[in-house]
Amino acid sequence: MRFGYRTGAFISLMESRKKIALGAVLVALALAIGWAWRGGLHTAAYSGPHGAQAAGDGADNAQAASRPRPVARQNPARADFQTAVWLLPLVDGLARRSAAGDAQASYELSLIYEECIGYFDPAQGTVAPAVPREQRSALYRSGAWLATRCEGLGSREDILASFRYRRLAAEQGHLAALIIQLSFAERLQGGERFSPEEQRSLIEVALARGDGQAYLALSMALAYDPGGVGEALAPYPAGNEVAVAGWMMAACDAGVPCGANSALLHDLCGRSFMCSGQSVQAAVVQQLSAAERALARQQADALALRSRGLRGQH
């Protein structure tokens, strides 16, 4: 495994913590299905393969009819994970690449199965009043997009496949997968919490690479502060909603597609009710105060500066 920065420490860390039980990844699922953000917006209708919980007024249902059908989709051979209108045709090719040792293919498979585990489907329910009215059009748009993109996926077996491919990607050396595995899985089975030094090493590996996917993983891994982690990792953002927004904005700055038609924005909106018709950056700060928004932007800019400095050393 090659990380390009502080490599030796992580080879030994990976070897000592590599065998993570499949059931232990349930905590990652809890985070993946619903990014914990202010408010209880998950009372709106959610859809997996087993139906939805309907709530709210029925007038919005008409918007579900605009969902494109498979016959109208783009040629899947010309699509990748980021741009595919329909994900199912990508699975076999990614599985072959994964079996041949391609860590990125393994990680993309984990994301595909994770994305399709649960989402708001406007064809099966209406949105609850808890979702602000100004966000509803974006929610219906993203819900319809996900329903089309995920057709044929979303079974209970796919939940296990998401865990399996994320673990495989970590074993194959994919940094974002490794961050998620090591940050969540062992905590659930009672393993030791990573020390601030270990967490800092993960952060600096990601920054030295300018790895936007790893930044997204860190936005989850560093979202919560059970006891002084935010202070221990300073100046790196950690432990609160502002830190989450800072890391996600940094991921966008690093090249992760974050525009109005990006897979990430649709995923945040259709599965976590963090909606914006503009961009991921707008979606992740909308629950923050003006001062918090400014701080998140400052943190993202500081991460970009630190990334450039670390890359200049290697």
Image: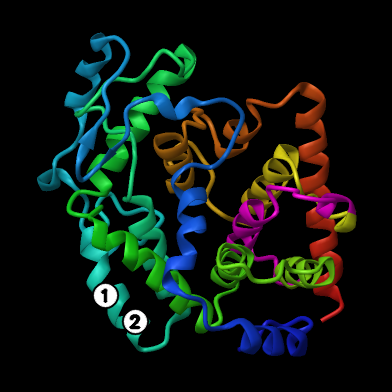
Q: Quadrant of residue 201?
A: bottom right
Residue at x 37%, y 64% (from the top left corner)? 162
Main SS, magenta residues: helix
Q: Which residue is mark 2?
A: 97
Vertical position of residue 202 compared to residue 303: above or below: below
At mark 1, the secondary structure is helix
Find the magenta span and give its range. Answer: 208-231
Location of residue 84 (image quadrant)? bottom left
Whether the residues at callouts 1 and 2 have beta carbons within 8 Å, the answer is yes
| Residue nearest the observer in this picture, 74 or 179 | 179
Q: Which mark is residue 93?
A: 1
Q: Is residue 169 visible?
A: yes
Residue 79 visible in this rendered orientation of the protein = no
The percent position of residue 130, horizontal first and vertical second, equals 46, 16
292 displayed left or right of 189: right
Q: Amino acid at mark 2?
A: Arg
- Which residue is at the front of the view, 116 or 19? 19
Report the residue that reaches farthest toward the left. Answer: 71
